[in-house]
Image (cartoon, rainbow, N blue to C red):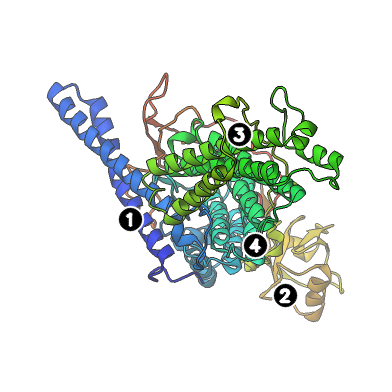
């Protein structure tokens, strides 16, 4: 079961607010789509003026709603550990919202039509599937929640193989809302459902990571592990579903999110190293300097990636600024540690000069002109000058971090962030004031950049789906290798079998289910309608889809000389049919939202009626360079094309026939 969606917890309130905002954005987007269509259709100048005025209002309303959604994405305090901490907050991902899906009629119709079985016998299985999906909308923030999401994802592998043929849709519409823009994406393609569940698995890992107690060694280890697993899931999503129609799951956005999660894991590693305190010792400070410089470097790369198109338009502005603040903050700490090395640790007679020279040299790609590392270590004046130069650079970085934090409305309201930045700034100022007073303008030394280096590896951890064991809800349909949506069968035929002198007149092979071969054309079974290659699914009213050759033979022998009824099915050739493909996401179309099935009122669809195939969706947006983005995507067909047979797997996540476009 999932968490209570009505529980008055901080996270539940945020998700409820996200759901309300998604609905408001949907209404505004529909109004904008209608206004754009009217603007293209009318030639009346007065009407065009009114429509343009309405469009400007709707666009401003959408911008306000987007800012409110960004506010939810930066509400990081709710997800942090409840303990009193003095650490910069980490950023979690919010769960994608979805609408209810009713599998009942489509699956029951498919079972009756495709498998020729009584669909009423599968009502409990369908209900279990729907209950599992509903629970996955509110997973608990722990390993149990992760396991539930993974079990649903694996269950979708079975459902896809059994009920979603590559040649047509069965009438199940999936709606998921973009985590950053709030714009809904609707498709009848199950791959949208699978990709969205994967995204939520990664998002839940980030929420688990931010919830860990960063004041303990175990808490920091769990946080590092959670962020690495989140990066692994998002990386798997990026590599497996390459044509997702939602901005939050586009390859460019996922690439940024993976970098951000690895950066947060790196930050937790640094906190883990310094948890017990940083000894004011030469070689310890050298290691800490390079470790913290590595944190600053990875956050700089994250900030750079966030400011690239097409991600820049949809990534929360406050996330980008927080990455910039963290980059400046940790670079400042690197220069502060270097200054401490130079100012507090003069070379003593018993010290190993070579080891200190080698260690200090590793901090720099180059040293200021006219200086040598060994000379700096031996000369007290040069040590002080270079140390103060590092302090000045640290103060500059601290002030820049505070300035950026003050300019961002969302970030300046996070008290603990302001406290950490201010405390670090004051510490550097105090250190600078403690140095001997001298005319700084006479010193032309510029502190060189610190080379980042780490002894602790941070990398993505690939999801281990095999650790979660799930049972196919629709196990009763038979072995998946045979009874799948890609295979077509005749309706079960009843064969009355009479024993002839103890012989069956045919042999059995394979299984389960077993197949008839070496059929004697003149035997009674052949006369009754048994064919070479038929599969036996029932013997004497007992289901035997999961029985092997020996078990079926035992059942046939157990009836003795009495006649027995067999139910058999025959494989049909799969005819070539149309493939509907359509595109909703384009790397070249920044600012383009995907709104699918706007013209279709999903809540009023009568699923009991067989309607002709409708257009997959309506893709709309701003104009591209050469053509309007509001285009109608029609199904494509290739005459005379034949379906290529592929090896069946219940967990096939991507194929050219049914990939997300």
Residue at x-position 60% and y-position 45%: 333
Which circle, 2 or 4, is nearer the viewer? 4
Q: Is 614 placed above or below 497 here?
A: above
Q: Position of residue 175 (x, y in %)?
A: 43, 51
Residue 483 seen in the current view: no
Neighbor class of circle 4 (other Cα within 10 Å; few <14, some 14-19, many 20+) is many
The residue where tag 2 is placed is: 564
The secondary structure type at the circle numbered 4 is: helix
Which circle, 2 or 1, is nearer the viewer? 1
Q: Earlier in the sequence, mark 3 or mark 4?
A: 4
Q: Earlier in the sequence, mark 2 or mark 1?
A: 1
Neighbor class of circle 3 (other Cα within 10 Å; few <14, some 14-19, many 20+) is many
Residue at x-position 45% and y-position 29%: 589
Residue at the extreme top = 626
Which circle, 1 or 3, is nearer the viewer? 3
How far is the residue under mark 2 from the one under mark 1? 62 Å
The residue where tag 3 is placed is: 389
Circles 4 and 1, Cβ within 8 Å, touching? The answer is no
């Amino acid at each position: 079961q999932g968490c209570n969606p009505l529980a008055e917890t901080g996270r539940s309130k945020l998700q409820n607010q996200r759901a309300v905002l998604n609905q408001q954005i949907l209404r505004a987007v529909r109004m904008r789509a209608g206004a754009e269509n009217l603007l293209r259709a009318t030639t009346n100048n007065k009407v065009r003026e009114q429509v343009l005025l309405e469009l400007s209002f709707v666009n401003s309303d959408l911008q306000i709603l987007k800012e409110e959604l960004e506010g939810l994405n930066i509400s990081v305090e709710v997800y942090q550990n409840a303990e009193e901490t003095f650490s910069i907050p980490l950023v979690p991902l919010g769960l994608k919202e979805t609408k209810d899906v009713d599998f009942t009629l489509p699956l029951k119709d498919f079972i009756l039509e495709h498998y020729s079985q009584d669909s009423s016998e599968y009502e409990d299985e369908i209900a279990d599937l729907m209950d599992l999906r509903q629970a996955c909308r509110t997973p608990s923030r722990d390993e149990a929640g992760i396991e539930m999401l993974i079990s649903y994802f694996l269950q979708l592998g079975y459902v896809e193989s059994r009920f979603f043929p590559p040649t047509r849709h069965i009438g199940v519409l999936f709606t998921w809302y973009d985590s950053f823009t709030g714009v809904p994406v609707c498709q009848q393609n199950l791959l949208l459902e699978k990709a969205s569940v994967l995204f939520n698995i990664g998002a839940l890992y980030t929420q688990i990571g931010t919830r860990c107690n960063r004041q303990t060694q175990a808490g920091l280890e769990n946080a590092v592990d959670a962020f690495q697993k989140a990066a692994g899931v998002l990386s798997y999503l990026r590599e497996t579903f390459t044509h997702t129609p939602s901005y939050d799951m586009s390859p460019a956005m996922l690439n940024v999110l993976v970098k951000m999660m690895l950066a947060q894991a790196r930050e937790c590693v640094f906190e883990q190293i310094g948890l017990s305190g940083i000894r004011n010792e030469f070689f310890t400070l050298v290691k800490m300097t390079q470790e913290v410089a590595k944190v600053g470097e990875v956050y700089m790369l994250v900030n750079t990636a966030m400011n690239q198109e097409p991600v820049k338009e949809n990534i929360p502005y406050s996330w980008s600024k927080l990455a910039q603040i963290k980059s400046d903050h940790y670079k400042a700490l690197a220069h502060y540690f270097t200054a401490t090395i130079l100012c507090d640790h003069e070379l003593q007679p018993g010290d190993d000069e070579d080891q200190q020279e080698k260690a200090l040299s590793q901090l720099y790609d180059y040293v200021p002109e006219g200086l040598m590392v060994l000379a700096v270590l031996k000369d007290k004046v040069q040590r002080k000058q270079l140390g103060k130069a590092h302090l000045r650079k640290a103060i500059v970085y601290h002030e820049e971090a505070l300035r950026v934090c003050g300019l961002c409305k969302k970030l300046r309201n996070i008290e603990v962030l302001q406290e950490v930045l201010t405390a670090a700034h004051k510490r550097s100022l105090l250190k600078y004031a403690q140095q001997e007073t001298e005319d700084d303008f006479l010193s032309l030394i510029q502190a060189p950049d610190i080379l980042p280096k780490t002894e602790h590896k941070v990398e993505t951890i690939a999801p281990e789906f095999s650790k979660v064991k799930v049972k196919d809800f629709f196990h009763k349909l038979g072995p998946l290798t045979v009874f799948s949506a890609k295979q077509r069968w005749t309706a079960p035929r009843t064969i009355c079998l009479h024993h002839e002198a103890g012989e069956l007149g045919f042999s059995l092979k394979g299984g389960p289910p077993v197949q008839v071969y070496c059929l004697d054309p003149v035997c009674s079974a052949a006369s009754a309608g048994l064919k070479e290659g038929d599969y036996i699914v029932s013997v004497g009213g007992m289901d035997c889809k999961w029985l092997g050759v020996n078990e079926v033979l035992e059942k046939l022998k157990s009836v003795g000389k009495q006649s027995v009824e067999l139910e058999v099915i025959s494989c049909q050739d799969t005819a070539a049919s149309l493939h509907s493909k359509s595109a909703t996401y384009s790397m070249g179309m920044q600012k383009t939202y995907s709104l699918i099935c706007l013209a279709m009122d999903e809540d009023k669809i009568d699923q009991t009626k067989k309607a002709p195939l409708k257009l997959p969706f309506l893709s709309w947006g701003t104009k591209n360079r050469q053509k309007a983005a509001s285009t109608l995507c029609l199904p494509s067909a290739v005459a005379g094309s034949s379906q290529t047979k592929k090896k069946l797997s219940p967990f096939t996540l991507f194929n050219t026939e049914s990939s997300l476009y």
